[in-house]
Structures are given as C-alpha cells and as structure tokens.
Image: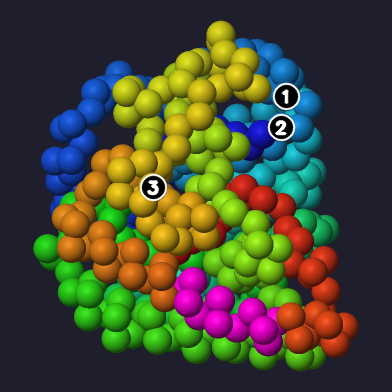
Amino acid sequence: MFYHVLLTNNCNLCCRYCGEKAFRCSSPELGKFSIDENLPPNLSFDLKKLYSFLEKDNDATLTFYGGEPTLKSDLIRKIMDNAKVKRFMIQTNGLLLDKLEPKYVNKFHTILVSIDGPKSLTNYYRGNGVFEKVVSNLKKIRSNGFEGEIIARMTVEEKTDIFKAVKFLSKNGDFSFDSIHWQLDANFWNDFSKRNFRKWAEENYNPRIEKLVDFWISKMENGKVLKWYPFLDTMEDLLLERKSLLRCGSGYANYSIMTDGSISPCPIMAGMKDFYLGNVSESNPLKLKKILVKEYCVDCKILDFCGGRCLYSNISSPWPENGRKIVCGTVKNLYTALKKNIPRVKKFISGRKISLKDFEHLKFNGAEIIP
C-alpha cells in the first residue's frame, strides 16, 4: 500500500494556482461537509504510532507531503531513520532539496518535483528565480549520487502550451526529465466563473494533446517509450485491455496520514472529517475502508479508462456541471487520441522496436495519471 504523510501545511511559495487561490477563491462546496478545524498545522502525533502502523504492511511505500515537506527536514530524517517501509518518496517544490544530506536524498525511490515548463512559464506561476533554483538543486542531487526517478510534476493552466512545455522539460539545456506528469488546475477551486477555461481547453489544450500523443508515439519507432505518465499508464492498460479504478489509487491503494494521525483517502481531503478512515494509533493499514468515486462517474462510458479522475472533485464538485463537462471532455479527448493510435503502437511492438515491458512503471507513485 502507498501512504502520503503530511508533515506540515506550511509552504515557502505562494503559487498562482495554489497559495494565491487560497486567498482569492472561497470554497462554499466544503460547507456540505464537517471540517476538522482543530487539525494541527504541523505533524504532532507520536511517531512510534506511525512506525507501528506501517510495520503492519510489509509492502508499504511512504511519500513525504505538505505543504512543503522539506520545511520539516528534521522529521524527514527521523522518519527515514526509523520507519520500516519498502520505499520512500517525496513530493516537493525542490527549493530546499540541497539542505537535505545525500545520505537521505539518495534513499528516495522517487522524487516528484513541481516544475511547469520553461523558465518563463515556471517563474510566472511560481515566482521569480524558482526555475533556476530547482534546476540547480536537481543537478546537485544527481552529482551527489541520486539514481532514483525524478518526475517533473507540472500544474497546467491557461498560460500553458502543453505541447511546448512537455517537450521542453523532456529535452533542454538546463535539466532534462525522463519522467513527466501534468495535472490540470481544473475543478479543484471555486474559480470557474473567473476563468475562460472552455476556450483554452477546447481550442488549445485538446488539440495540443493530440499533437503530443502523436509525437510520443513517433518516438517509439526509434525504440523509445517516454515516461510521460498520462500516456504511459493509460496506454499500457489499453494494450492489455485492463480496466482501472481511480488511477492515483486514492481511497483504495493510496491513503494519506494527516498531521494528527487521522487517515484520509487523499491528501487534498485533509480535514474532511466525514471521510476519515481511522487513525494510525488504532487502525490496521490492510483493513482500511475503500472510498470510490460515484454519482456521474459511475455511468460514464470511459470510467474503466479514466477511473474517475479525482476523488476530491467527484465528492465536493467545486465547479458547476457545465465546467465539469469541459474537464471530462479533456479526458475523453485523451482517450480518443490514445485509442486511435493503438494499431501504431502494436505495429511497433510486433516489429520489436519496443515491447510491452517498456510501459512498466511503479503504480500509484504520486502521479495522478489522468490530468
């Protein structure tokens, strides 16, 4: 099983799509739920309870999460020294990676680092100098011996040209990423009325995704299956004719441990008491209740492909129905673009340019898969 542990709610950035929106966009949809207003801002429970909880799962993966988890580097060190888990991962903005000693950094199986594309785009969303600092730190940890997977974890909004941004991150003179994932900033905040999302999604994002899929598949002719997670995970299942639940695993394979030890289906659902599934002090990780998507998702024709996109969005519905349908349209566009290219991929496989093994990857590694 996979577990996110929230070390702190604090962050050292105020990105346009996250911290800034927390001040600008009210969330009336959360009024439908009981909110835990006493949830501490920093991890505050006995770590021995965490260790005991994790020891009951001999296949546990622990991902450090926040806020910004590296603000609590002391906790990272302590947990990595004492928790008996199969692997450690971290989702970080990358600004403080140079403050964590190689002894710990090199123990990570995967580092998901927030970066949105070229310098101008990343710095627009995240702040001046962020791109340069992140790249510098990534070069440093590689030179210090980190051999694990580094995933570029993009957030995508209307300023993003997805085709150019992904291609840049994949190959550039600053720091090229072998692994890339992107997530649309859509249907997470009460901000639909403030945006022109429909025009951008339908006239820019969707056509550029089709072009990006074509480019991704063209690289297979030369024997390369790029680890672009929204394509990689979904294409593997299409080839194997395999159905999928929610692809990030939230609520059934991937759980989140709050700062007080409470267990939630998803880190975004921190404080939503109606969906708490227990506490590390008393729960068996192998017997946690499953929380699955419902309502409009269960009748969707591509549910087995999409899995529901996002549990939090499915439950809380931050956008009106017309906005949600636009987001669902981007998923249907992704599905159509990949499905129509299955014959090309099979041709490369039969011609032994690539193999099914080239699509293998660690499931539930923090990439939500469906943008």
Whether 341 is among the magenta residues is yes
Query: Residue at label 3?
Result: 298
Circle 1 residues within 10 Å: few <14, some 14–19, many ≥20? some
Residue 193, position as x, y percentages in the image: 12, 63
- Depth check: give the residue in front, 333 or 121: 333
- The mark that comes first in sequence, 3 or 1, is 1
Residue 358 falls within the magenta-colored stretch: no
Residue named by callout 2? 60
In the image shown, does 161 or 333 lie closer to the viewer? 333
- Marks 1 and 2 sit apart, C-alpha to C-alpha, by 5 Å
- The reply to whether callout 1 and callout 2 are in contact (CB within 8 Å) is yes
Mark 3: secondary structure: helix
Residue visible at 26% across and 25% down in the picture: 35
Residue 330 sits above or below residue 210 on the image: above
Q: Nearer the viewer, mark 3 or mark 1?
A: 3
Residue labelled with disc 1? 57
Q: Residue at the location (43% across, 86% down)? A: 208
Question: Label 3 amino acid?
Answer: Val
Distance, label 3 to label 2, CA atoms, is: 29 Å
**Earlier sequence position, callout 3 versus callout 2:** 2
Whole-angstrom CA distance, mark 3 to mark 1, is 30 Å
- Amino acid type of the residue that numbered disc 2 sits on in the rendered structure: Ala
- Kindly check if marks 3 and 1 are in contact, taking CB atoms under 8 A apart as contact: no
Where is residue 104, by image quadrant? top right
Looking at the rendering, the stretch of residues picked out in magenta corresponds to: 334-345
- From the viewer's perspective, tell me whether residue 226 is left or right of residue 338: right
**For the residue labelled by badge 1, is the local secondary structure a helix, a strand or a loop?**
loop
Name the foreground residue: 34 vs 240: 240
Q: Amino acid at mark 1?
A: Asp
Residue 51 image position (x, y, % from top left): 68, 19
Task: Name the residue: 77% across, 56% down.
Answer: 148
Q: How many marks?
A: 3
